[in-house]
Image (cartoon, rainbow, N blue to C red):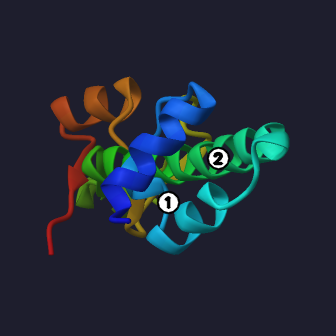
Amino acid sequence: MAKAETLKALEAKTGLELTDAAHTAAQLDALAKLPEDKLEEIRTALLERESTFKARQQAELDASRKKAHTIRVRVSARIAEFGGAFYDPDSGLTLGAEIVETELTPFVNQKLGTRELEQVRD
């Protein structure tokens, strides 16, 4: 039986809505071969794989979003000249003459606007 057919059969058997990408064909085939009296074990195995898959997807999405809102900054040359630095209360980072990768917090955004911080591009 093809993966899509096995997935549909297991959905009908268990009453669950399953994500195709969360399961391999071999996993689905093995679960489909289990007898009806093992229904609770089948449901548990499927739900565990679904949960793991969704958690991994969410982690990848969060990492992607964080990367999209991350910038590299340092204090302006004039402030660095005097050894100045800022503490960002939103991220908990100290921003000084060394380049720091940080999220674009309201504090960082404000300091960029006043040119006390400068964004460093590659």
- Quarter assignment of residue 51: top right
Residue 115 location, x and y as percent? 18, 40
Which quadrant holds the C terminus? bottom left
What secondary structure is found at the residue carrying circle 2?
A: helix
In the picture, measured across the screen, residue 72 lies left or right of residue 92, that is left
Query: Which mark, residue 23?
Result: 1
Residue 96 location, x and y as percent? 45, 57
Q: Is residue 62 visible?
A: no
Task: Return the disc, 1 or 2, that comes first in the chain's sequence.
Answer: 1
Residue at the image position 14 percent from the left and 67 percent from the top = 121
Residue at the image position 43 percent from the left and 54 percent from the top = 6
Q: Nearer the viewer, residue 68 or 16?
A: 16
Residue at which label 2 appears: 46
Q: Is residue 94 visible?
A: yes
Q: Nearer the viewer, residue 48 or 67?
A: 48
Circle 1/circle 2 CB separation < 8 Å: yes
Query: Which mark, residue 105?
Result: none
Residue at the image position 64 percent from the left and 67 percent from the top = 30
Residue at the image position 63 percent from the left and 52 percent from the top = 49
Circle 1 packing at 10 Å, graded few (<14), some (14-19), many (20+), is some
Distance from Cα at disc 1 to Cα at disc 2? 8 Å
Amino acid type for the residue under numbered disc 2? Leu
In the picture, measured across the screen, residue 36 lies left or right of residue 113, that is right
What secondary structure is found at the residue carrying circle 1?
A: loop
